[in-house]
Image: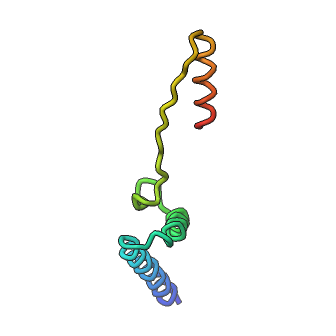
Amino acid sequence: MKAIALETIAFFLIAIVSIMVLISFVGINIPQALKQGYCSLVQGLVGFLPLPESLKPSLPAFCKEQSTQQTVYIEAELPEKISFEIAAYTIACW
């Protein structure tokens, strides 16, 4: 009975590893239209794996959120207005 259980677990682990390898190969050259679905699938699989954070595989570069920079010119002269505008832009961007 133990041999059947161990064999089933081994097949299950091999299947999971095979699926992850297949997804990683497909993920290299994936069309733009499928990237969002692929990224959510990979994030779900990575979240499902019972591994510590240090052992979980990293997401592909196109799945990570891109941060954008925006230059804002503050034309106020009073320090109170400058600090208020900086705080307002910080909260808006957060």
Which residue does the image show at 47% across and 88% down from the upper left? 3
Q: Quadrant of the rendered structure where residue 26 is?
A: bottom left
Residue visible at 59% across and 9% down in the picture: 78
Count numbered badges in the picture. Answer: 0
Q: Quick one: 78 or 90, which is closer to the camera?
A: 78
**Quarter holding residue 13:** bottom left
- For the point 51% across and 25% down, the residue is 73
Q: Residue 77: give x, y in percent of width and height.
A: 56, 11
The C terminus sits in image quarter: top right
Q: Nearer the viewer, residue 45 or 2?
A: 45
Q: Position of residue 79 (x, y in %)?
A: 58, 10
Provide residue 23's location: percent of width, then percent of height: 42, 75
Position above or below: 75 against 58: above
> What is the x, y in percent for residue 86?
57, 23
Which color scheme does this rendered protein use? Answer: rainbow
Q: Is residue 31 above or below residue 12?
A: above
Which residue is at 49% across, 36% downward?
Answer: 70
* Camera-side residue of 2 and 51: 51
Question: Which residue is situated farthest in the top direction here?
Answer: 78
